[in-house]
Each structure stands twice: as structure tokens, then as C-alpha cells.
């Protein structure tokens, strides 16, 4: 599911190139030309997510906003702050993506999404290892994960060297 939605984001960002060109024509710094398109792209995603949440609330009787808000106030505040932090971090990733994309030559613009998604996998793997989430998985899965992280690092460096030449 995540792969499908990630591909959808990539397609949406490619479809938004006319918006980027319009922003550039207005004199917007190349680092920021993609940002206006995010309002449209992520606004659509937010509407779909909101609709899905209402459908789930209607279908699954065990889910209840009333029950969620009956929890202890400190727990609700803690959860809201963590949700806000997660949303902020998720949104900021696209700022960084746009900044990196602005520095990649036009003939290699397809590479920026690959690097972006690879960085996701790399960070998730490293965080999982650091937080010892893989301790009880056994030696082989941890070895495969570690080798996968090394492959991503090597591949990203090869791409960087290739673009530099």
C-alpha cells in the first residue's frame, strides 16, 4: 500500500511541474518553486485521509472519538503532541526533498525520488537497529538489514559520483 501511495506522490510531483515553472517565472527562488504545489497535492491527500477516517468510524463500532477523548488529559495531550510532531516531520521531508531536487540536474530528476525513498528505508533500518527493535529477530534478519543499509549507502554514493561526472 505504501509503495502505491509513494508512487502516487511521485506522479503528483511530476504532474505539478507546470506549477513549478509558473512559480519560477514569478521569480521564486529555485529552492522553493515546488512548495506551492504541495498545497494542492497534500490537500487532496488530506481530504482522502479524512474521508477514510470517517468511513472507518462509521463501519467499525469499536472506534469512538468519545472513548478516545475520555482518556486521561495528559495522555491525550501527549498523543496530540506526538501526532503534531509526526505530521510536521512528514511535511518537512518534502521541503528537504524539494531543496535536494532543485540541486539535481534536469536530466537526472528521476533520481531524486529514488534517493528520497532510499533515505526512508535507510533511516528506518538504522533507527530500528539503534532502538534494538530487531534484538529478538535473530542474527540472519539483522545481518540482512545491515547489509541492506550498506547497499543503500553505497548505491547513493554511486549515484552521487555519477551525477558529479
Image (cartoon, rainbow, N blue to C red):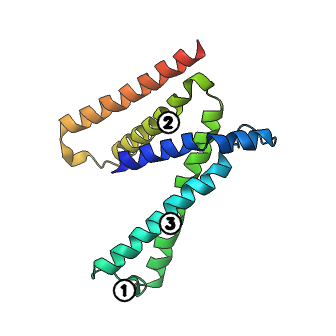
**Image coords of residue 48 (percent x, y):** 46, 64
Q: Could you tell which of marks 1 and 2 lies nearer the N-terminus?
A: 1
Residue matched to label 3: 47
| Res 113 label | 2
Rendered residue at 36%/74% (across/down): 55
User: Tag 2: Cα neighbours inside 10 Å, few (<14), some, or many (≥20)?
Assistant: some
CA gap, disc 3 and disc 1: 24 Å
Q: Nearer the viewer, residue 84 or 62?
A: 62
CA gap, disc 2 and disc 3: 24 Å
Kind of element beneath mark 1: helix
Q: Nearer the viewer, residue 96 or 133?
A: 96
In the visual, does 122 lie left or right of 91?
left
**Image coords of residue 32 (percent x, y):** 71, 43
Kind of element beneath mark 3: helix
Which quadrant of the rendered structure holds the C terminus? top right
| Res 67 label | 1
- Image quarter for residue 127? top left
- Image quarter for residue 105? top right
Q: Could you tell which of marks 3 and 1 lies nearer the N-terminus?
A: 3
**Image coords of residue 136 (percent x, y):** 20, 48
Q: Could you tell which of marks 2 and 3 lies nearer the N-terminus?
A: 3
Rendered residue at 44%/65% (across/down): 49
Instruction: Report the residue that reaches farthest toward the right.
Output: 27
Q: How many marks?
A: 3
Tell me: residue 7, above or below residue 40: above
**Image coords of residue 142 (percent x, y):** 25, 37
Kind of element beneath mark 2: helix
Tell me: residue 136, above or below residue 116: below
Rendered residue at 53%/21% (across/down): 160
Which tag is nearer the camera, tag 1 or tag 2? 2
User: Tag 1: Cα neighbours inside 10 Å, few (<14), some, or many (≥20)?
Assistant: few
Instruction: Report the residue that reaches farthest toward the top.
Output: 165
Amino acid at each position: 500500500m505504501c509503495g502505491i501511495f509513494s508512487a502516487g506522490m511521485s506522479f503528483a510531483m511530476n504532474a505539478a511541474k507546470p506549477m513549478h515553472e509558473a512559480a519560477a517565472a514569478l521569480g521564486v527562488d529555485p529552492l522553493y518553486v515546488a512548495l506551492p504545489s504541495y498545497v494542492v497535492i497534500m490537500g487532496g491527500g488530506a481530504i482522502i485521509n479524512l474521508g477514510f477516517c470517517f468511513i472507518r468510524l462509521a463501519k467499525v463500532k469499536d472506534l469512538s472519538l468519545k472513548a478516545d477523548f475520555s482518556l486521561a488529559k495528559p495522555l491525550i495531550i501527549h498523543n496530540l503532541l506526538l501526532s503534531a510532531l509526526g505530521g510536521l516531520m512528514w511535511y518537512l521531508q518534502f521541503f528537504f526533498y524539494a531543496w535536494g531536487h532543485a540541486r539535481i540536474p534536469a536530466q537526472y530528476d528521476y533520481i531524486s525520488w529514488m534517493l528520497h525513498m532510499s533515505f526512508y528505508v535507510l533511516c528506518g533500518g538504522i533507527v530500528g537497529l539503534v532502538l534494538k527493535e530487531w534484538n529478538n529477530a535473530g542474527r540472519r534478519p539483522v545481518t540482512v538489514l545491515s547489509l541492506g543499509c550498506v547497499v543503500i549507502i553505497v548505491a547513493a554514493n554511486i549515484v552521487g559520483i555519477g551525477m558529479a561526472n
